[in-house]
Image (spheres, rainbow, N blue to C red):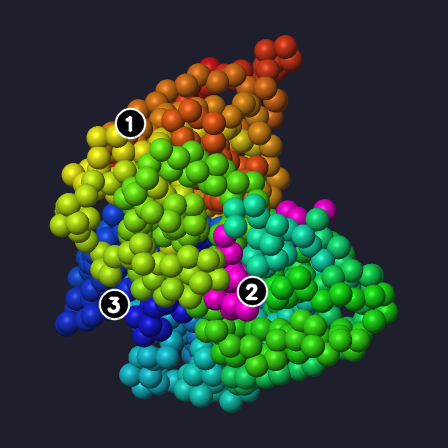
Amino acid sequence: MASLIPKTLIPIRSLRPLTRFKATATRAMSSGSTQRVFQLKLDPLTGNSEWVVIEDQDQEEQVSEIPHKPLLGTTSYLDMLNDSPRNRAFRQAIDKTVTKPCHVLDIGAGTGLLSMMAARAMGSSDSTGNEGMVTACESYLPMVKLMRKVARLNGMERKIKVINKRSDELKVGVDIPSRADILVSEILDSELLGEGLIPTLQHAHDELLVENPQTVPYRAITYGQLVESTFLWKLHDLQNNEAEACDGIHLVPSGLGSILGVKPQQYAMHCDAIKDEIKLLSEPFKIFEFDFWKRPDSHRECELHIKATNDGRVNAVVSWWTLQLDCEGNFFYSTAPGWISSSIDAGSRHWCDHWKQCVWFVPGKGISVFRDEEVYLHAVHSDTSISYNLKTQASRTEGTQYGFDPWDLQLILSPERIAIYGDNEWRHSMLKTLRNALQERVNSLCIVADDSVFLTLLIAHLSRTSHVISMFPGLRNKGAQYLQAVANANGFSIDHVTVLEKRKTYLTLDDTHQRKVDLLIGEPFYYGLDGMLPWQNLRFWKERTVLDRVLSEDVLIMPCKGILKACAMSLPDLWNSRRCLSKIEGFDHSLVNTTLGACGELPAPDEGPCLPFYVWQCGESKELGQKFKVMEFDFSKPIAPCYGKAQVDFTESGICHGFALWIDWVMDSENSTVVSTGPDKRYWKQGVKLLAHPVAVGINESRNVGEHTSMVFEASFDPSNGELIIRHDFL
């Protein structure tokens, strides 16, 4: 996300999305006592966006005006504040570091938790009357407004000076009276550097901190481990995975290995969820060390010689980091996977979603190694990322990626999309459905409504007489350039394929040369929006509606309908990470719950939002009943409001924390081909609706007192905004 938006337009702390942040970009303006933040809001059913305004007029007057809707519900603030080991470790380190009145600077202050810890640890004034001060720097206006309320609730508003700026905009003598003695901050992501840790520390040491300051954290160390995993391999090596496909399509033709793939970067992932599918090929190894108490370098390199502990093929480097919070080394926090058993890591191991492990894919099929063989790992870090290159002594060329340019890849897709395109079962489903649809349609006009390069190529391959219009609403010219590059390798001309040069509100018969459309298809897939809720892919239905005037009476639409499905789930780890906050290390945070979209004691009718997750990565989970149908979306008709209701019996005893929801795409009218995106399909995200309160459920034969044996589930879909309203009643 950070790479898509100019750094000058986005506050660091707003880079903490779970999967989708409604405000994907911000611009700040100030005039007198009024400050405005413009946020870019996306309409998921049209792909259109608009700038909306958040104003902070008179701060004292407006501080209580926090929106009732969970404005920040899609961010990871709530999960982070529910991370008890993190909170405890920071509190212990701050108590040990801030021992007298001084100037403490908190960068990326969020709700002000670390600032309040520092103010409390500082105590009253010293013998000279110095009371000390805490400066809380936070660039994101909605969070600033929330922080002020939290500080006031805890009696800290006079002890903390809140500044609504980026830290690199602060000036000594203007914003703060003097350089700070102590820095407390938590501007870390799963990779460690992605939230701008290095440039933030550089500016702070240059402009805002005294010489040799104290810091919390004191140090961070990154670690890695070589692993073999078929699952991880399939997430990036499309060329080898599609080699056995029966459809004759080559998305990555021989000789064009860089034409389509994933971006070479570290990908955050809950690796414990696939621990049974991972073969460890080395012991953990230390990579980089970052000292917060001194100015960091923007660029460093190191070469490690790693001894293989097993025979196998290195498909990926799994990495994590450990924080040393205080200078003496008494307090630590780690994001290590569960199979790491050191005392430091074991003491803080727990499930949380704001920090995960990271995975770096070794290109192609990976590197073959033998036990006790040395693997050479070349690690490089920039201001914002860490990357790796691997090679072995036996083969200096196999797997080597020195000098690799990420922009050599012409079309960048997500790892999950790469895995879908390499999945033979999915490709066979598309081949079967399209072949049947085209059998009786010679010289047809086909529209690909979404961003599917695969379907475009497949139609062109199956029917040399059909004309194809690819709308490519997200890919645009990238899609056209890709098709041009791979056409010859796939054995056809793209003379009968047209890519719309610019997005149109609707098509007319002039655009189709007075011909009606015989076939309208989609996966559906929209480029760059992989993290959306499942029903937001009903944009396909919206597109079908807009195209209605150019569709023939007997047009075939693929998929022909979508079925919204759901399942009651036990999700204790996820629910606990999203639960209502009360006191955090002694500081009352109860007023942030509605704004952050928490589960629990929210005032009626407020409730937490439905959020997109890979359910298989959500820690402990269990299905408590059969998967059930909620409602159908009929794509043969224009988009319309929908409603569904189902009564479901539980088949397992346990605690219900919420529901997983997804869409099964019915590709043909005979219902012979259905593509499910449910929880057992790991390449798609599901929507998760968490309950305000967990509910005990059971089955009739062994029902205990207080357990519910069934429930009524209702849902309604609003096509004006793409929202799904869910109601439920346990019986």
Residue 100 horizontal/vertical position (percent): 52, 75
Lateral position of residue 520 relative to residue 251, left or right: left
Residue at image mark 1: 642
Q: Where is residue 162 in the image (x, y as percent from the top left)?
A: 34, 68
Image quarter (top left, top right, bottom left or bottom right) of the N terminus: bottom left
**Residue tagged 2:** 254
Residue 387 falls in which quadrant of the image?
bottom right
Query: What separation in Å lies between label 3 and label 2 (alpha carbons)?
Result: 45 Å
Q: Disc 1 versus disc 3: distance between alpha carbons?
A: 37 Å
Do we see residue 7 in this rendering?
yes
Task: Find the residue positioned furthest to the right.
Answer: 372
Which image quadrant for residue 412?
bottom left
Does 271 lie within the magenta span?
yes
Q: Which amino acid does label 1 sit on?
A: Cys
Name which residue lies at 59% across and 15% down. 699
- Residue 27 badge: 3
Q: Which element carries disc 2, helix, strand or loop?
A: loop
Whether residue 16 is visible to the viewer of this picture, yes or no, is no
Tally of marks: 3
Give the label on residue 51, or none: none
Give the answer, above or below, for where 210 lies relative to 220.
Answer: below
**Principal SS element in the magenta part?**
loop
Residue 188 on the magenta segment: no
